[in-house]
C-alpha cells in the first residue's frame, strides 16, 4: 500500500489479514518535503474499531505495529502519525479482514503480482540515503518564452557625480568629515566644502573684518565695565535710601526712584554680560578655526543631488581641486533596469508588452519577476541596431535587497503566449536516456517505472509533458538519475531487505 499525504509518504507492507490471527504491518514513512525518513514519534493504525500502534520506530523510517482483528469484513482504515518531523492522519481506504486463511490465500492468488514493463525496484532505505524527492504531475498554465541575453544597469537619474564648481581647497562639511565609500547619503546633504583661494583685495577685506572685530571686542569690554560700575552704585543708593525711608528721613518718591534706577542698571549689566558671552564664543571660534570668518563665508558647499550610496571618493580633505573636478560618485540601486536585445524577426512576439523573468548566473536559484513585482510596462526601443539587427527592450525591477548589481549579466525570458498544459512536471524530473527524455514514476513505494516522454514548452523550472504521464502521478526529481542507474542493474538496487 502506497499513500501520499500532504506531508508524509507511507509505504506499508502487510499480509492478507485473517480474523483472530496476528498481523504485522511494516510502515515506511518519509517526509515529502525533505526525502528524509521519520526518525521518531508514534504510529497508531485504526482498522474499523480495532487499534494497534507503536511508540517508536524499529529503526529510522520503519514502524511495525502488530495486532489481530476479531471480526471479518471490509473496514475503513487510517494511520495516525505523531512526530516532531511531521504530524498527519493518512486515509488508507478499505482494509479487508478475511474469515479464514483459505480465503486470504485465494485473495492473494487472484491479485496477480506480475511487475509492469520497465519496472525499477528501489528500496526505501536507498531512497532515504539519497533524500529522494518526488513531484506530482498536474495541470498548470505555462508561458511560452523568448530567451534573450540581457544586463542590469542603473536607471536614468540613479547615478550622479558631484563636481567642484570652482577651484580651491576641499574641506570637511559641517558634519565633521567627508563621506567614505559605502556610506548612505541623502539628497541635499552637504558632502564637503570648497574654499577658493584669496586674492589681494580679499585679504585686505579679511584684515579689515578682523580689525573691526577687535574694535568691537574692546567696545564690549568697556561697556561691560561701565555697566558693572553703575549697577554697584545703584545697589548702594537703593540701600541708603531704604534706610532713610525706614527712619522717616526720605520720601516714598525717592525710594521708588532708587528702585527704578537699580532695575535699569541690572538690565544694562545683563545685556553687557550677554555681549561678553557672544564675544567669548567668537574668540573661541577664531582660535579653533571654526568661526564664520570672511574665508568661511566664501566656502562653497558640495551637495548630494540624489539619495544613494557613495561608490567613489576621488579626493581627500585638504586636497586642491580644480573647476569641474569630480569629487564624489553616488549610486541609487534601489531600482535597476534589465535591458535585453530582441532580434527584429521576433518583434511580432512582443507587441503586447509581455511580462518577463530575469535569471542571473551570479544568483543561482532565484528568478526575478519583472512585472509582477514592480508593475508598469516595458520600454521597447524605436530603432533597430544596424549591425546586430536587434531592438532594445527594457524592464524596471525593484531591488530593495540589493541582490542585483548594475553591470551584471542576465538571461531575459520574455513571455510570448500562454499554454494550458494538462501535465506539468519540474525540469529536474526529466532524465535523458539515449538522447530521449524520460521520467521515473513511483508505482508503489519501492517500485518505479521508466516513462518515455514527449515534451512541450518549458517555463522556468517547469516543463510541459504532452505524452507519457497522467495527472496525479508522482515522478522522482532529486535522485532520478540514480534510479536510472538502478534500471541498468536491478539486482544491485532492488535486493530484498530484512525487517
Image: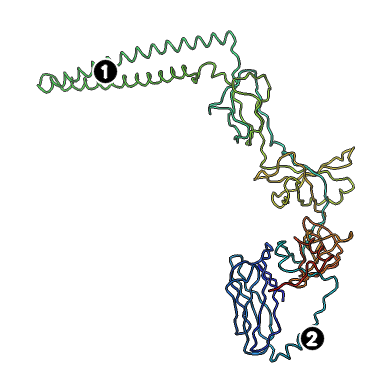
Q: Is residue 273 left or right of residue 404?
A: left
Classed neighbour count for the residue bearing mark 1: other residues with Cα under 10 Å, few (<14), some (14–19), many (≥20): many
For the point 39% across and 11% down, the residue is 218
| Vertical arrangement, residue 138 with respect to residue 163, above or below | below
Give 377 or 286, whichever is nearer the viewer. 286
Identify the secondary structure beneath mark 1. helix
Q: Is residue 313 left or right of residue 378?
A: left
Q: Is residue 472 left or right of residue 65?
A: right
Give 155 or 3, whichever is nearer the viewer. 3
Query: Which mark is nearer the camera, 2 or 1?
Result: 2
Decide: marks 2, 1 in contact (CB < 8 A)? no
Image position, residue 466 (x, y; %): 85, 65
Name the residue furthest front.
498
Q: Quadrant of the N terminus?
A: bottom right
**How many numbered marks, from 0 up?**
2
Give 402 or 34, whichever is nearer the viewer. 34
Image position, residue 177 (x, y; %): 56, 27
Q: Is residue 61 left or right of residue 111?
A: left
- State the image quarter where residue 186 is shown: top right
Residue 160 bears which disc, if any? none
Classed neighbour count for the residue bearing mark 2: other residues with Cα under 10 Å, few (<14), some (14–19), many (≥20): few
Nearest to N terminus: mark 2 or mark 1: 2
| Vertical arrangement, residue 476 with respect to residue 197, above or below | below
| Vertical arrangement, residue 314 with respect to residue 431, above or below | above
Tag 2 residue? 110
Q: Quadrant of the C terminus?
A: bottom right
For the point 58% across and 69% down, the residue is 41
Identify the secondary structure beneath mark 2. helix
Residue 231 bears which disc, if any? 1
For the point 65% across and 74% down, the residue is 90
For the point 57% across and 11% down, the residue is 202
Image position, residue 390 (x, y; %): 87, 42
Amino acid at each position: 500500500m502506497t499513500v501520499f499525504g500532504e506531508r508524509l509518504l507511507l509505504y506499508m507492507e502487510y499480509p492478507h489479514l485473517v480474523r483472530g490471527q496476528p498481523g504485522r504491518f511494516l510502515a515506511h514513512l518519509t517526509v515529502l518535503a525533505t526525502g528524509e525518513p521519520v526518525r521518531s514519534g508514534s504510529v497508531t493504525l485504526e482498522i474499523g474499531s480495532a487499534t494497534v500502534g507503536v511508540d517508536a520506530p524499529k529503526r529510522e523510517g520503519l514502524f511495525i505495529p502488530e495486532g489481530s482483528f476479531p471480526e471479518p469484513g471490509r473496514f475503513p482504515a487510517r494511520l495516525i502519525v505523531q512526530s516532531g518531523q511531521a504530524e498527519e492522519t493518512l486515509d488508507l481506504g478499505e482494509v479487508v479482514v478475511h474469515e479464514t486463511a483459505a480465503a486470504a490465500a485465494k485473495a492473494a492468488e487472484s491479485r496477480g503480482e506480475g511487475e509492469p514493463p520497465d519496472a525499477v525496484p528501489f528500496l526505501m532505505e536507498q531512497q532515504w540515503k539519497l533524500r529522494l524527492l518526488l513531484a506530482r504531475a498536474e495541470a498548470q498554465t505555462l508561458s511560452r518564452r523568448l530567451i534573450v541575453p540581457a544586463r542590469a544597469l542603473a536607471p536614468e537619474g540613479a547615478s550622479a557625480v558631484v563636481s567642484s564648481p570652482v577651484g580651491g581647497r576641499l574641506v570637511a562639511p559641517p558634519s565633521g568629515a567627508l563621506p567614505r565609500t559605502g556610506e548612505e547619503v541623502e539628497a541635499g546633504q552637504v558632502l564637503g566644502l570648497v574654499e577658493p583661494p584669496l586674492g589681494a583685495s580679499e585679504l585686505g577685506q579679511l584684515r579689515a573684518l578682523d580689525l573691526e572685530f577687535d574694535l568691537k571686542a574692546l567696545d564690549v569690554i568697556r561697556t561691560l565695565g561701565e555697566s558693572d560700575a553703575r549697577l554697584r552704585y545703584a545697589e548702594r543708593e537703593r540701600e541708603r535710601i531704604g534706610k532713610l525711608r525706614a527712619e522717616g528721613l526720605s520720601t516714598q518718591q525717592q525710594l521708588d526712584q532708587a528702585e527704578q534706577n537699580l532695575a535699569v542698571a541690572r538690565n544694562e549689566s545683563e545685556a553687557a554680560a550677554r555681549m561678553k558671552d557672544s564675544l567669548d564664543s567668537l574668540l573661541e571660534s577664531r582660535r579653533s578655526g571654526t568661526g564664520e570668518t570672511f574665508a568661511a563665508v566664501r566656502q562653497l558647499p558640495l551637495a548630494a543631488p540624489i539619495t544613494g550610496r557613495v561608490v567613489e571618493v576621488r579626493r581627500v580633505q585638504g586636497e586642491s581641486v580644480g573647476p569641474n573636478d569630480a569629487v564624489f560618485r553616488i549610486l541609487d540601486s534601489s531600482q535597476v533596469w534589465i535591458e535585453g536585445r530582441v532580434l527584429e524577426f521576433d518583434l511580432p512576439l512582443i507587441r503586447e508588452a509581455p511580462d518577463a523573468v530575469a535569471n542571473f548566473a551570479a544568483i543561482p536559484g532565484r528568478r526575478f519577476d519583472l512585472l509582477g513585482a514592480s508593475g508598469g510596462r516595458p520600454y521597447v526601443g524605436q530603432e533597430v541596431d544596424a549591425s546586430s539587427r536587434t531592438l532594445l527592450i527594457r524592464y524596471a525591477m525593484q531591488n530593495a535587497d540589493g541582490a542585483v548589481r548594475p553591470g551584471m549579466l542576465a538571461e531575459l525570458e520574455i513571455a510570448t503566449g500562454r499554454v494550458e498544459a494538462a501535465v506539468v512536471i519540474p525540469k529536474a524530473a526529466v532524465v535523458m536516456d539515449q538522447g530521449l527524455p524520460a521520467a521515473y514514476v513511483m508505482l508503489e513505494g519501492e517500485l518505479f517505472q521508466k516513462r518515455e516522454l514527449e515534451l512541450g514548452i518549458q517555463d522556468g523550472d517547469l516543463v510541459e509533458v504532452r505524452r507519457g504521464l497522467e495527472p496525479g502521478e508522482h515522478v522522482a526529481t532529486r535522485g532520478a538519475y540514480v534510479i536510472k542507474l538502478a534500471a541498468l542493474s536491478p539486482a544491485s538496487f532492488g535486493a530484498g531487505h530484512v525487517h
